[in-house]
Amino acid sequence: MGTIKLNPDNLKKKIKGLRDKADEAGRARASIDRESENLGDPSPSKAVDTFCNNSATHINDVRSCADRIESEMNRIIELNQSGVATMNGGTITVENVPDTVLKGGKKEFDTWSQGALDGKDAQTLLNGGAPKSGRTSSEVQASMEANKDKSSYATAFIDGVGPENITKLPITFATGQQQEEDGFNTQLASTLGNILAAATSSWSSEKNKEVSDKIVQTVDCENSDKDPRNQYFEQIKEAKQLVALNYILGSHDNDANYVNDLRFGTDFLVRTAEGLEKIDPEKIETLHLNAKVSNENNKDKAFSAMYKKGHSFNPMGGVLDAMGGNADAALKYLAPSTKDGKVDASRVEKLTKYDWSWDPTGFDGLTSAIAAASSKRSSTATTPSGGPSESERARQLAGVAVHEIAANVPQANPHDWWWDRNKYPKGTTSYNDAAKVHIGQLLANCAPELTQTWNDGSAVNPSTGKKLPRAIEDDFNKLTYRVADNENATATIAAGIAKRATERSAAQIDANAGNKDEQLEKINEAYSQGSSALNHLTAIADVRADDNTKASENDANVKTAASAAALTAFTTVATGGLSAPFQIGGAVATTTLTSPIITNQVFGADKVKSTMNTNPNEQMWAYAVRDAANAGLLNENDFSAPGSENYSWIVKNGDGQHRIDLSKASQEDLKDVKSWTDTVNENVKIEVPDTTSPSGKKDAVGDPAFKTLGDEFNGTSDEGHKDGHRDAKNREQPGVS
C-alpha cells in the first residue's frame, strides 16, 4: 500500500507552465517556418519541413502530458470532494493505494479511483445521504456493472462502501417492483458477486479473512439487544441479507452448465463457510417459516417474495455453490488434513445430515461443492507438510459423500400430495436438476469403483487396490436411481465409465507388454466391465422412467431419453470425441470430470436420439478391436480381408502398418467393425503355432486374437442390464427410503 499527496494549487501552476512552454515553442516553430518560406526555403533536403513536423509532434506531446496530469489532478480533487481523500494545509492525501495501482499508470489509477468513488457514493446513498457527485443509485450501479470484473476497481469499491454493507446494498437499492418480485435487487446482487470474486481472487489471505468476517457478521441473525422485539426485527433484517448473500455468491451460471461461473478467492470462501456454519440452522428454518407466514398474510412483501421465488435461506447454500466454481476451496473446506496427517471429511457427513427439505436450492449448493472437490481425485499435487495428497483427500471425500448422501438425504417424489409426504423420513429432499447433475459428476469421478461395484459388488479401484471409504453397492444404486431421470446426469456418469474403460484398456496393454494373450484378455475385461456398468446404468434409467410415468416399460430395448444420453456420452468419449471436461492426473491414469456433461451443448438433441437403437455389444467390440489393432496385437493380414479398403476407419501408420481410428466414427461405422472382423474370421488365412506339424506352424482361417478378445464378451451388456433392472426395482422409489 502507498500514499499519494497532492497540492492542487502548486500543480496547477506547473501545468500552466507546461502549456505556456508549449505555446512558446509553437510560436517559435511558426516563426522559423515563415522566415524559411520568405527566404525561399534555402536549407537543403527540406530540413525546415522535417524540423517543423518533428517539433509539432513534440509540442503536442507536451500538451498531452499537461492534459494527462490535469486529468489525474482532477480525479484526486474528486476523491477529496467525495470524502475518499483528505485535505490538510492545501495538500490532498490519498491513503491505502495498492502498489499495483501505483505501478500501473493512469489507466489503473483511473480504474481504482472509480471504484473508490462508487464505493463512497454507494455508502452515502445507503445511509440516506446525497453524494457530492450528485449521482443517483442507478448511475452508481451502472458504473459498478461496467467495472465489475476489474480487481483494482473491486478492491477500491469494497473498501469504499465497507464490507459490512455488501449484503445491505441489494435490499436497500431495490425498487418497489423488485421487492415484490424477488424481495431484493437481484441484478445488483449478481454484480456484487462479480466484484467480490474479482477482489477476493487478488487479495492476501489476511485481507480475505478480514472482509469475510465482516460480511458474516451482517447475516448471522444474532442481536445483543435485550428487547426481544428489536431482536426479532434485527433477525428478519439479517435473514433478508442472508438471502441476498446467497444470491451474491451463487446464482452465477450464465453458460447453463450447473457450475458457478465465478472464482472467488479460496481463503475467502473457506473463511466465509467457517463463519456461516456456526449459524443455527433451526433459527434460519424458523425465519424461513416466518417468510411463508408473511407471504400468506401479505405482511412483508419483500420477505414473502423471497419465499415465493424459492431463493435459498440456508446459511451454507451460496458459499457452497461458489465452491462449485473453486475446487481448491471445496476440497480445503470439506476434506482438510488433520494435524496427525489424516483426512477429516466430517463436514460432509454433518452437512448431509442437515435437513435440506425446506431448502432444496441449498442442497444444490452442497452437491456442487462436493462434485468440485471430487474432481481433485486427478490432482498430482502433494502436501508440503507431508500429509495426505489432494487426490487422497478427494478420494476419501468422494467415498464419504456417496455413502452419506445416499443414507441421509432421501429423495422426495414431486408427484406426491402434501399428505402423502407424512410417510417421508426426516430430511427427504426434492432433488432439483442441478443437484442431480452434480451427483452425476460425483459418481462419474468414482468411475473405477463404480464400474467394479456393478461388476463384482466391491467398491475397489483395481488400479490401486484401495476401497472407496464407506461406499457400498447399495449407495451407488440409490444415488443413480435418484438422478437417472436426468439426461445430463446419466450422460456424465456414462462419460466417466467410458473414460475408465479406455484408460483401463490402455494401462493393461502397457502393464502386460510382451504377453499378447494377457493383453487381449485385459482389453476384453476393460470393455466387458465397461459394457456391464453402462447397461446397469441404462437399466436403472429405464426403471426410473417407468416409475415416473407409472407405465410399463419392461422391454430392455426401449430406451428412455436418459439412457439414450448415457449411450451417446459413452460412445463419444470411447471414440475419442470428447476431452474438454476431463482432467487427467499423472498417477495411475486417474481421470476426473471438472464439469458435468450437458447433452444439448455437447452432443445436440439429434445425436442423442440417434442412439435409441444402438447395440451396446457392437460398440464395445469396436473399441476392443481398435485397442488391439493399435497395440499391434492383430495380424497384419487381417487388413487384407475383402472390403477392408472401403472402411475409412482403417488407416495406415507412417511405417505402413495398419491401425483403426474411430475418432470420427458414426454408429454405422461401429457396426461395421463387427462385420469386418466376421469377414476376417471367414476369409483370412493366418499362420498359427502347431506342435504336431513338422514346421511347427499351420494355416488357419481367422485371427485367433479375436477369439481371446471376444471370450464371453457378448453377454456382458445383457447381464449388466438385468442386474441394473433388478437393483433398481429392489431399490427405493421417490419418497421412500
Image: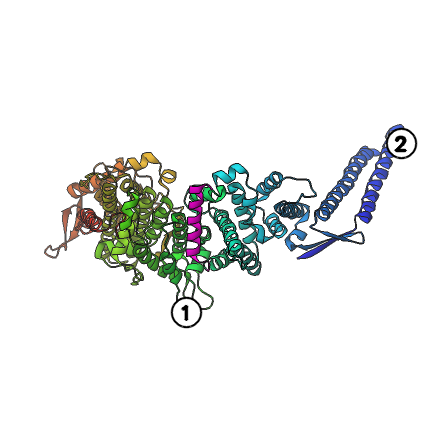
Residue 12 part of the magenta-drawn span = no
Q: Which residues are magenta?
A: 278-298
**Furthest residue in direction bottom, as rendered:** 340
Rendering quarter of residue 695: bottom left
Horizontal side of 680 relative to 19 (left or right) equals: left
Identify the mark nearer the N-term, 2 or 1.
2
Residue drawn 50% across the image and 53% down it: 232
**Furthest residue in direction left, as rendered:** 692
Q: Secondary structure at mark 2?
A: helix
User: Which percent across, then down, holds residue 420?
Assistant: 27, 46
User: Which percent across, then down, holds residue 701?
Assistant: 15, 45
According to the image, label 1 marks what residue? 341
Mark number for residue 35? 2
Amino acid type at image mark 1: Gly
User: Which percent across, then down, holds residue 1?
Assistant: 66, 57
- Crowd band around label 2 with a 10 angstrom C-alpha radius: few (<14), some (14–19), many (20+): few
- Crowd band around label 1 with a 10 angstrom C-alpha radius: few (<14), some (14–19), many (20+): few
Q: Secondary structure at mark 1?
A: loop
User: Which percent across, then down, holds residue 543?
Assistant: 22, 44
Q: Is residue 585 visible?
A: no
Amino acid type at image mark 2: Glu
> Closer to the camera: disc 2 or disc 1?
1
